[in-house]
Amino acid sequence: MIWSRILPGAVLLGLVIFVHELGHFLMAKWRGVTVLRFALGFGPKLWGFTRGGTEYCICWIPLGGYVQMAGDQPEPDGDMPGGPHEFLSHPWYGRVLIAVAGPLANLVTAFVLLVIVGMIGITYPDYPNRLGTTPDTSLAYRMGLREGDAIVSVAGHPTTSWVQIFVRNEDVPRGTDVEVVAQRASESVRVPVASSQREPFFSSLHRPPDPPVVGSVATGMPAYRAGLKEGDRILAVNGKPVLTWDELPLAFRGRVDEPVHIDVQRDGRTIGMTVTPMDPEGRGKENGRIGIEPPRGALYVERHNLLESLDLGLHATTSLVGSVYAGMWLTVSRPLYYREYVGGPLFIAQAARQQARRGLDAYLQFIALINVAIMAFNLLPLPVLDGGHILLAVLEAVRRQAISATAYVRFHKVGLFVLGTLLVIILANDPMRLVQRHRALDPRSTTSERAPAPNTP
């Protein structure tokens, strides 16, 4: 049981750190810079060996890793290193290549993982192939379909689930008529659909609505902090009854940063709690989210060949890069608001376990996301980070003169202070988030009867 909790996070962090440091290591070797140590983790050495003049080791504190190169610090007497095999005396473009290699390795790893996901299959929630509400004003109704009908074939191909109905339609070339067959009790209903009607017809098909039952709660999101759990049924939002899952987004819309009272049914009891929707993408007040998903029942798996997966991987990687940088900008522009959603190793481990439970494709996509996040963070032009080394190297190229050892030391002291402060915030957020979650789940913090709620829509 404990391994199922630890292993997904340990594998993720180990892979991301190893790939990043391996990029630096290989480029340094290729450029002829002496590598003294290749370490995963920080602090005292737990295990290691020496080969070819390089010490390879695993350290006690699993918060990162490093590649120690000869001459990567000024000499004790204040002079800069001067040997060709030393990092700081290496040509500026060589230092840029070494610094970029780590983040680039993470980016390439993310792309490869997303290509693999395309080939092993992307899973989507799927549902029974039965129609839900079909208003008499809809095209599906006018063409003979009714609520409760089961769509059993499209264009002569059997359909046994909801997603298959639309996949079969997409497989038929445009400009072609199709026939849809529905089963109604013991009767088969055949519906010929002309090519010009295909898009509006299939758009008019709706499945039965999901009940407002929580299937999963995203770590760190408002629902997590409020104490919502898997299996909870949301009965009302601000006193207004909720009957279907589709009503929830409307109930939270326009309520970003506003406390919202919800009534939840759990283990036969009605519990009142307060949740404050947030705007994770920075889109505005209308984008209220609390971080819950409906239960995942049946799954539809979509697999692609190598060429299709390469194209999907490229687009998905580009999208991830954009999302990560957008998130970083939100964190910088509104640090007090988004700092609660910044997490360290514990947060990543929790999220990794959650994604692993969803399936291999979700887990690999999450590893790709963390790789891109590590790449983006390390490219920030801050001292100590790879971006700081790149900045100094580019300044040297522009000035045609290396900075002094004194300036180099001061530059890195600033970086250590900034990163140290950020590390304290991140590491403090992890246990505080767990404490808040524990308090929210404490039975003494909830009521067994419906709590009064404002009667507002």
Image: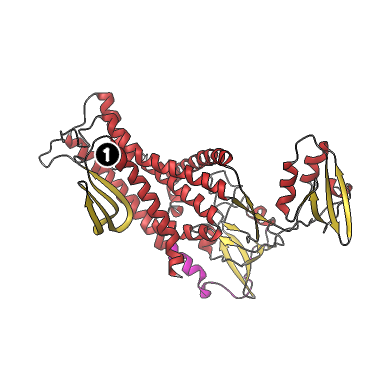
Name the residue rendered at 38%, 54% in the picture.
Answer: 14
In magenta segment, residue 437: yes
For disc 1, the marked residue is 29
Residue 280: percent from left, percent from top: 53, 49
Name the residue rendered at 24%, 39% in the picture.
Answer: 411
In the structure shown, which secondary structural element does the residue marked by tag 1 occupy?
A: helix
Q: How is the image coloured?
A: secondary structure
Amino acid type, residue under disc 1 in the picture: Lys
**How many numbered marks are there?**
1
Residue 42: percent from left, percent from top: 27, 55
Residue 56: percent from left, percent from top: 26, 52
Name the residue rendered at 64%, 76% in the picture.
Answer: 268
Tell me: 132 left or right of 256: right
156 and 132: which one is in front? 156
Residue 380: percent from left, percent from top: 37, 39
The range drawn in magenta is 433-457
Q: Give the image quarter of residue 8.
A: bottom left
Tell me: 104 left or right of 205: left
Q: Give the image quarter of residue 435.
A: bottom left
